Image: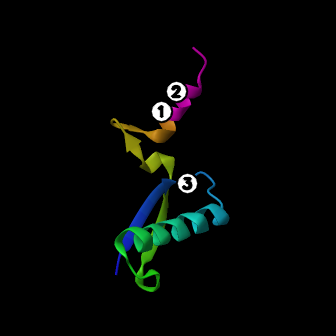
Amino acid sequence: MPYVNIKITREGASAEQKAALIAGVTALLRDTLGKNPATTVVVIDEVDTDNWGIGGEAVTMLRARAAKPA
């Protein structure tokens, strides 16, 4: 039983986009590894950008700094 956990920032991914991710990952596992789609679990976790860090800094702050004119 494959279990796939996708983590994305919470920035408005639509229900349709998330459904496409679930279907696509399930199909990839079926086509590549021969896994049964009926037993494939895909979970999408949406994380606030305040709780997602890159290079020691929260994504919220990185994006705010990048958006400021030079």
Q: Where is residue 42 shown, x and y percent of the image?
A: 45, 72
User: Left of 4 or right of it: where is 47?
Assistant: right
Q: Residue at x 44, y 58 (%)?
A: 7
Judged from the image, the secondary structure of the residue bearing numbered disc 1 is: helix
Q: Where is residue 33 shown, x and y percent of the image?
A: 35, 71
Q: Residue at x 53, y 34 (%)?
A: 63
User: Left of 22 or right of it: where is 13?
Assistant: right
Q: Residue at x 63, y 54 (%)?
A: 12
Q: Where is residue 3 shown, x and y percent of the image?
A: 37, 74
Q: Looking at the picture, which amino acid does disc 1 mark?
A: Leu
Q: How many circles with numbers are drawn on the protein? A: 3
Which residue corresponds to mark 3? 10
Which residue corresponds to mark 2? 65
Q: CA distance from mark 3 to mark 2?
A: 19 Å
Q: Looking at the picture, which amino acid does disc 3 mark?
A: Arg
Of the 4 image quadrants, the one containing the C terminus is top right
Q: Residue at x 51, y 39 (%)?
A: 60
Neighbours of disc 3 within 10 Å: few (<14), some (14-19), many (20+) = few
Name the quadrant containing residue 13.
bottom right
Q: Point out the residue furthest to the top here.
A: 70
> Which badge, 3 or 2, comes first in the chain's sequence?
3
Judged from the image, the secondary structure of the residue bearing numbered disc 3 is: loop
Q: Magenta stretch: dominant SS?
A: helix
Name the quadrant containing residue 39.
bottom left
Neighbours of disc 2 within 10 Å: few (<14), some (14-19), many (20+) = few
Q: Are marks 2 and 1 in contact (CB under 8 Å)?
A: yes
Q: Is residue 65 magenta?
A: yes
Q: Where is residue 2 shown, x and y percent of the image?
A: 35, 76
Of the 4 image quadrants, the one containing the N terminus is bottom left
Which residue corresponds to mark 1? 62
Q: Which residues are magenta?
A: 62-70
Neighbours of disc 1 within 10 Å: few (<14), some (14-19), many (20+) = some
